[in-house]
Image (cartoon, helix red, strand yellow):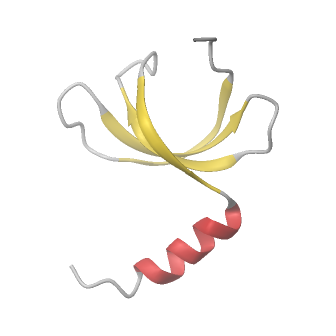
Amino acid sequence: MADLKYHIVQTLMVFPADGKFHKELNLIEWGDRKAKYDLRGWNSDRSEMTKGVTLSKEEMQILKEKIGGIEL
């Protein structure tokens, strides 16, 4: 598998670690593409990552609106 090119533009949130990985919500540029919101697990030095979810700005706005109505 080819090396993934990415650049973390901004880290928005870091969740507590659960074992080897912790989750982060970042704004990431994947390859030469426009930055998107990304939630996934990373190891402590960000040399390894888990599968994650990538959202456009529009999708993130919908999630932000909808999540406010969820009762925990």
Looking at the image, the residue that sits furthest to the top is 2
Q: Quadrant of residue 24?
A: top left
Q: Quadrant of residue 57?
A: bottom right
* Relative to 68, residue 13 above or below: above
Rendering coords of residue 51 (x, y %) = 43, 36
Looking at the image, the residue that sits furthest to the left is 19
Looking at the image, the residue that sits furthest to the front is 1
Locate the C terminus and report the quarter of the image it occupies: bottom left
Left/right of residue 49 with respect to residue 1 in the rendered view: left
Left/right of residue 38 with respect to residue 36 in the rendered view: left
In percent of the image, x 62 and y 12: which residue is there? 3
In percent of the image, x 67 and y 29: which residue is there? 7
* Relative to 12, residue 31 above or below: above
Locate the N terminus and report the quarter of the image it occupies: top right
Rendering coords of residue 16 (x, y %) = 25, 43
In percent of the image, x 80 and y 44: which residue is there? 34
Left/right of residue 59 with respect to residue 65 in the rendered view: right
In percent of the image, x 69 and y 69: which residue is there? 58
Rendering coords of residue 22 (x, y %) = 31, 36
The foreground one among 23 and 59 is 59
Rendering coords of residue 44 (x, y %) = 35, 22
* Relative to 56, residue 15 above or below: above
